[in-house]
Amino acid sequence: MATVVLKERLNLEKLFPSYRELIVKNPLLQTKIIERPEINRFSWGRFSNDEIEHFLSFEREHLAGKYDKETVLQQYYPTNTRLPFHITVVDDYTVVVNMHHAIANGRCFIFWIQKWLQYYSDEQMGVFDQTAPLPFAPKFLLMVKRIGAFLWLPVFLANFILNARKYASKDTVDLSCGKMPDKNQVYFTRSYCFSREDTKRILLRCKLARMTLTEYMCVVLAKALSNSAPDKSRVFISLPMDMQSLLPYSPENTCGNLIASLPAQFFQGRELEKQVKSAFKWFKRGVPYSLSCLFAAVSTSYEKSKAQCLELCKKPIPDRSPLWNFSLTYSNLGVISYPVMEKLVDSIFFYFKSQSVLLASSTISGKLCMEVSFSKDLYQTEQITALFDQILSVEHLLK
């Protein structure tokens, strides 16, 4: 989900016509799953014209009303029960945009939001596809990168296991205090938006530290989480990675959430900046790609994989497992530079239903936007909000 705050009052007369045009002109947004039990397969297909018209009629009625944001955030629509991209009006300036995880990662999601805004604003300007592969990238170079990712994998696993040691899971900061998720989880979100001036100061602080924003935020977050639980020695952070560089795709025709995650562990008593720099080297080596391939290969049989994939498309999040009991998930979607979004959008906040505390950030029109989200069944709302109010204050980020 994305909460989009517009610079000007929402034009309700343009809202549904622009949404309809987006759906009708873009086949990917008509996607559904077709189960084929006779050959033990399922495939991606499209809703029929009658089904599309039925769903569009529903969306017309839905867009005519205004809804409480907290109620919208709790909703989840399994595949085939609604169009995979839909919009909800919150107030005169704010909409919540929802896209099903089966067909979009974060960067694809941004692509489709700007596509809708083009129809909404009647500005059919040229689109710079932020997810498109470089046209001169040869196939053999991609193959070399993939091979390199698998060659580095044993080194990563050995390093990870040696660092983690036997009691790492017991010594890991866990803001949920060991709780397991409830089937009907209620999620909470909190947004933080920094002015252009404060954003410049934060980015200058990153530059002086010779770090990217993502690296710098990992240092800040790891330090704060360690301080919140001084009796624990490890902070375990999940860092999602877009697979674009190793699996080139176009957001206009790709089904599947092409994201892999790098598990990064940081320990007290060691220089944190060096640990972060070391962890981010595994990104450049493509380890999240080879790691995801490894788990896919050894985890289950085809029968179980097929069943799991279908199940995941029909519910918001997988069950929590001890191995992936992260202290935090941090996802930086980067700088949003689509002209139509810079022109129309004041701020934007991203959110997906993670089992750990999720911090998602992006920068638009020079302003840094962040949103923290978590399950109320797993975490104490007051404790987490107080912690992140402190972490994400300008004063703290500029220390």
Image: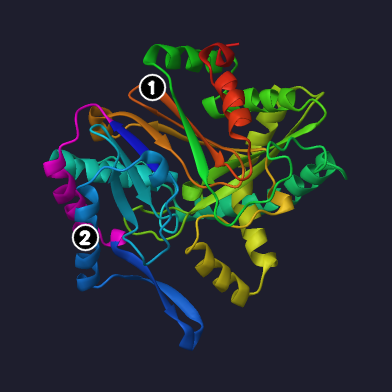
Q: Which residue is mark 2?
A: 56
Is residue 347 shown left or right of residue 358? left
Q: Secondary structure at mark 2?
A: helix
Range shown magenta: 6-29
At which x and y percent is residue 345? 28, 30
Image: 346 above or below 129: above
Q: Amino acid at mark 2?
A: Leu
Is residue 1 shown left or right of residue 30? right
Q: Verify whether residue 23 appears in magenta.
A: yes
- In the image, 188 versus 345, the foreground residue is 188
- Mark seen at residue 50: none
At which x and y percent is residue 360? 50, 35
Image: 30 above or below 85: below
- Mark seen at residue 367: 1
Magenta stretch: dominant SS? helix
* Disc 1 crowd, CA 10 A, few/some/many (<14, 14-19, 20+): many
Q: How is the image coloured?
A: rainbow
At which x and y percent is residue 393? 53, 17
Is residue 6 shown left or right of residue 364? left
Quadrant in which residue 58 is drawn: bottom left
